[in-house]
Amino acid sequence: MHIDLRQLRHLIALAEHRSFVAAASSVNLSQSAFSRSIQALEHSAGCQLVDRSHKELPPTKQGQVVLEHARRLVSGARLLSNEIRQFNGLEAGELRFGCGPAPAAGLVPKAIGAFIGRYPKARVQFQVDDWQRLNKRLLAEEIEFFVADTRQFEADPDYHTQRLQPRRWYFCCRVGHPLAGETSVSAQALLQYPLAATLRPPNLRKVIGDLSGQPDFIANVECENSYSLMGVVLNSDAIGICTANSSTGDLVRLNIEGLGEDCEELYTRYGIVSRGRMRLSPLAEAMIEQIVSTDQAERFLDACSLEQLAV
């Protein structure tokens, strides 16, 4: 079978769009030229790769096999071309990685800002998503690494994890909130007010549920964008969950009874996750180095910012 990367890219596009018209448009071809490309690939494979009798145009069994290999070959070709450009000059090339919503709220944008200052010609694409979807993209070689919770990967030899500094979660409210002046707040009193939080951290939700005597602890407002959530907190009586680096002078940190500093569930467990046996590109290594450096600097700033929060 003759391997034509262009035809493989067209098969991938058809699998993604499930339409000859949309797929052809996505690769800037006429529908007739796109159809001929798919037919030529099928002729080379010696079998039908797409079930044209079905409206959704699903791949046949043979097509599914070709599609899986096509994704790996096309991704590998892109990585090879990108890495050669990087070796020829580190400032050139493209870097793709992912991060969870919490790192995307502070750490990662700061690291990228410093990174593009060092490598202004580099192209950076970072996707914000939960760790499950980021892992799928990592396995599909769509990204080289991601920054998120590492607990699911630390014991798996197929992954390499690099822990970042733990960050403490805090319950907070706006200045002027009825709880703002309290020296300590019970879980029961806390839950008298709406809660605005990300879908994480689940362990902290369980702790509050246990403290309040409730089977679960469900937020009234959920969003994966930390800045948006803090906007809700600042404009209502909702209680928020934040880290020190996402707090502002308009927020008051609440001291919750029964939650001591030694409570493990109060801390993040973020890190950098990559494939265990995959070599990272020079740009990926440089970005990871920048993320770690920025993380260490933020850890120091966090300690300073805590002194500015009202207790």
Image: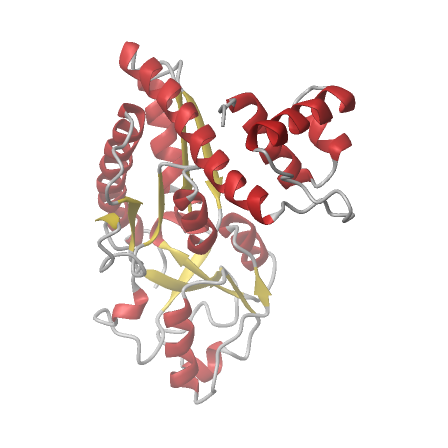
Quadrant location of the C terminus in the rendered image: bottom left
| Residue 80 placement, left or right of 237 | left
Q: Quadrant of residue 35?
A: top right
- What residue is shown at x 66% (from left), y 36% (from top)? 14
The x and y percentages for residue 46 are: 59, 33
How many discs appear?
Answer: 0
User: Can the viewer see residue 125 in this picture?
Assistant: yes
| Residue 177 placement, left or right of 268 | right
The x and y percentages for residue 55 are: 78, 47
The x and y percentages for residue 200 are: 44, 62
Q: Nearer the viewer, residue 245 or 121?
A: 121
- What residue is shown at x 68% (from left), y 39% (from top)? 17
The x and y percentages for residue 268 are: 31, 58
Q: Residue furthest top?
A: 88
User: Can the viewer see residue 100 in this picture?
Assistant: no
| Residue 188 placement, left or right of 295 | right
Q: Residue furthest front?
A: 46
- What residue is shown at x 52% (from left), y 71% (from top)? 178
Q: Nearer the viewer, residue 174 or 150?
A: 150
- What residue is shown at x 52% (from left), y 22% (from top)? 4
Q: Quadrant of residue 251?
A: bottom left
Q: Nearer the viewer, residue 63 or 74?
A: 63
- The scheme the figure's colours follow is secondary structure
Q: Is residue 45 above or below residue 217?
A: above
Q: Is residue 189 above or below residue 232?
A: below
